[in-house]
Image (cartoon, helix red, strand yellow):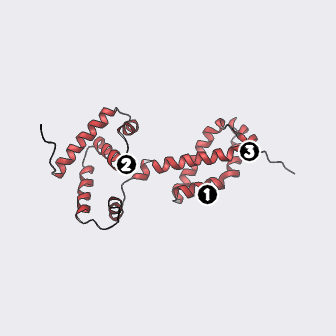
Amino acid sequence: MTCEPDDAALVTRAAAGDEAAFAQLVRRHEQPLAALIRRLVGNPADAEDVLQETLVQAWRGIGGVRAPGNVRAWLLQVARNRCRDFLKSAQRRDWPTEACELEWHLNASGRAAGRAQERTDEVLSAVGEMPPGEREAIRLFYLQGLTIREIAARSRCPEGTIKRRLFTGRERLRALLGAAGREEM
């Protein structure tokens, strides 16, 4: 009779670089990980990507497991964190591809917005004509709701640069849309 090593022994071996021990841990806990990720992410293709990211993160962090005998809980937490990051990421917040989907997001009741839809199309078109730095700052600040500090960190530039891009972007939008600019005092 072959005695399977327990989770704690596998974690210890994996932390020492034993890929086979890590693979055995993955096989042992893959189904609950995959089920959790599918439930949180929804889309099966995205769930597969998040599962792969979870396993990579787990391999990198296996040496930091505080309770090797309870590695399943640790793996599930890694999966939850990867799902949270995925759902917050910019790739999930791309512009909707369907006009009706965009309209629904802009009009919470989901009713046709008529002139509002036309104006939305004009604004999106104008944003698309902006220089890349301004366009990205406007998109992240107004459409994704990131703070200036978050945008600066993501863009790897000073907060003052982001503030300037937002100011310049707003002024450019006003000009492109024919809206009145700031009045001189």
Image position of 94 (left or right of 117) = right
Image position of 176 (left or right of 35) = left
| Sequence-wise first label, 2 or 1 | 1
- The residues bearing labels 1 and 3 have C-alpha atoms spaced at a distance of 20 Å
Q: Residue at x 30, y 41 (%)?
A: 133
Image position of 152 (left or right of 21) = left
Image coords of residue 85 (percent x, y): 50, 46
The amino acid type of the residue labelled 1 equals Ala
Residue that carries the numbered disc 2 in the rendered image: 144
Where is 10 relative to 107, above or below? above
Q: Residue at x 70, y 44 (%)?
A: 70
Where is 101 relative to 142, above or below? below
The amino acid type of the residue labelled 3 equals Asp
Image coords of residue 8 (percent x, y): 74, 41
Q: Secondary structure at mark 1?
A: helix
The tag on residue 66 is none
Residue that carries the numbered disc 1 in the rendered image: 35
Write down the quadrant of residue 124 in the picture.
bottom left
Residue that carries the numbered disc 3 in the rendered image: 7
Q: Residue at x 71, y 51 (%)?
A: 28
Q: Nearer the viewer, mark 3 or mark 2?
A: 2
| Sequence-wise first label, 1 or 3 | 3
